[in-house]
Image: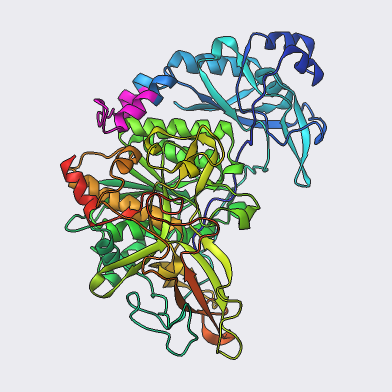
Amino acid sequence: MRSNRARMRAGVSLAATLPMLAGALAVGIPAAHAAEGVHRNTLAGTKPAWATARADKGATSNSAQVSARVYLAGRDAAGLAAYARAVADPSSPEYGKYLTADRARARFGATKAQIDAVTSWLTSAGLKVTGVTQRYVSVSGDVAAAERAFGTQMHNYAKSGRTYRAPAASASVPAHLAGAVLTVTGLDNAPHKANHKDQLPPPDSVFRNSGPFSSSYGSRTARTLPDAYGGKIPYAVKGYTGRQLRSAYGAGHYTGKGVRIAITDAYASPTIAFDAASYARKHGDARWTTGQLHQSLPGAYTHTEECGAAGWYGEETLDVEAVHAVAPAAQVTYVGAASCYDDDLLDSLGKIVDNHLADIVSNSWGDIEANQTPDLAAAYDQVFQFGAVEGIGFYFSSGDNGDEVANTGTKQVDTPANSAWVTAVGGTSLAVGKHDKYLWETGWGTERAALAADGKSWTDFPGAFTSGAGGGTSRTVAQPYYQKGVVPDALAKANNAAGNRVVPDIAAIADPNTGFLVGQTQTFPDGSQRYSEYRIGGTSLAAPVIAAVQALAQQARGGKALGFANPAIYARYGSKAYHDVTDQPTGTDLAVARVDYANGYNAADGLITSVRSLGKDSSLKAVKGYDDVTGVGSPARGYVQSYRRH
């Protein structure tokens, strides 16, 4: 699997406490400042959970520098959330009554008076305002100024063998600004955020798949290899193409014409347009027309080494090629973030909403929920809610590590896929047979066993878990109304008797062993850079596929935007709109044989043969009905057609 997910979070890992006068004195805030705090409003979720008394290493130097963002609540935060729900709910009289970006800002955005008041407060504390947008005011300055502004002292804390700065108590704002400020981010500096600007590195080293391959599922049987699950198994496919995916997910004659799709990732492959055009020509997709692919990029990139910028190029190329393969007439705008940090990713999402660049937004990145924080969750949700009232839907990959236990030691979901305001996309293993016929899908979950030295058996069959679709029950997000009555209580109430958000909502092809063929310019061992192709997977594939299917559905609906899609997705639960995906669709366990180059490029260092079992996603199971691997299922032939009636 070659997909990349954002691994670095700019942020603030936060837990809320209410600073009282005695508490303020206890952490050393001057008495006059503490007294002022009585007339301040706490910003819940602005003190990191790891900033404990035991980890405290003392006060941060007053001269240390802080960069922060104060996110603005706008003139009617509660009204924004209410309208975002109403406009997305098919049973609401407000359904589909979207606002333009200008009208959304006028109705729910921050006022000039609020921005001026927040700016004045920050500058009066001694902070320098470095940027002002409709969503936030960014500031920089020393710790002493930050302490004055936010009513809390900064201390140094031990965390994971390193020392980071963090607020000793939750931040607060003057009472008269309580309705103007949503939250503040950046008061802690874990992880460290460099400010220098780098040039993008060249494409990553080449990666290629060895054969033999199947051209369609089961077209070539591994007759010389050992049996698995009682019989011979097929070789993995070389990689499905758009024609096969369009057939599997019921595209029919729809092409996404007239629909705008945006794709966000960190950075931007310098060869993305060339690669996408080359791929389309080679595989029979409709050629890109002039102006069909747009790019909206920042003025400079940062943190390229920390984020592994070149490693994102395959992700970006996959997203663009997969969207075009399934919705070949859709307009595509690639919006690159300046880095993989939250502030920059939020800026890319905000750019789409502020300028209404698209109605459908595919996002193949995220992090584990444990790394998400209340302040950042609030900032993300605000963007998603503004998108909803404008008719913009966001689609996020659910993750590639199953329940995350093998990856983190803790069962958890990924974020921002856990947001109640986005569509979380899970993953499947897809079988497309001869004549592009849909055969079946399992939940994506892979167990791998290698071929024994004598070639007569598989070692430790079925082997160890390697990867699988992310899913499960959130610990931080309450159960949204649209999941009630569909998601089983055993899942919804796994962490809380009141119920929580369960991920994912819908699913599509993700298993790299039944994956998609992608073409990308790569760096070869001789130093040359040229176009090459390989099979790819991950929910990083599922997200753009679902985004493209949504474009087909929007076209079928006469071009009317689908907006935040979850209420409509769940309203179709149990209908012919979906394939109800299970882990044993044929009544038995399934597997494919895979042969790989040991060096990832050619046979010079030998080949590695393995068996990859399907439908083995850690502790998660794809079962009849809703499940936490595939959600309501994958789009069937009736899915796109169902929107013609709405």
Q: Residue, x 47% and y 27% (percent of image)?
A: 135
Give the tally of numbered discs: 0
Along the line of sight, the residue nearer the viewer: 456 or 7 = 456
Location of residue 465 in the rendering, given as x and y in whole percent from the top left corner:
57, 65
Along the line of sight, the residue nearer the viewer: 540 or 36 = 540
Residue 156 vertical position relative to residue 303 in the rendered view, above or below: above
Along the line of sight, the residue nearer the viewer: 542 or 167 = 542
Along the line of sight, the residue nearer the viewer: 243 or 412 = 412
Residue 438 vertical position relative to residue 621 in the rendered view, above or below: below
The color scheme shown is rainbow
Residue 536 vertical position relative to residue 82 in the rendered view, above or below: below
Residue 291 vertical position relative to residue 564 in the rendered view, above or below: below
Residue 363 shows in the view? yes
The span shown in magenta is 82-105
**Horizontal arrangement in the rendering, residue 51 relative to residue 274 (left or right):** right
Q: Quadrant of residue 476?
A: top right
Q: If the image is split into quadrants, where does the C terminus sit?
A: top left
Q: Residue, x 23% and y 45% (percent of image)?
A: 554
Location of residue 83 in the rendering, given as x and y in whole percent from the top left corner:
34, 25
User: Does residue 203 belong to the magenta stretch?
Assistant: no
Q: Residue, x 46% and y 13% (percent of image)?
A: 113
Residue 293 shows in the view? no
Location of residue 568 in the rendering, given as x and y in whole percent from the top left corner:
29, 40
Location of residue 557 in the rendering, given as x and y in whole percent from the top left corner:
19, 43
User: Does residue 100 belong to the magenta stretch?
Assistant: yes
**Horizontal arrangement in the rendering, residue 126 relative to residue 311 (left or right):** right
Q: Residue, x 70% and y 21% (percent of image)?
A: 145
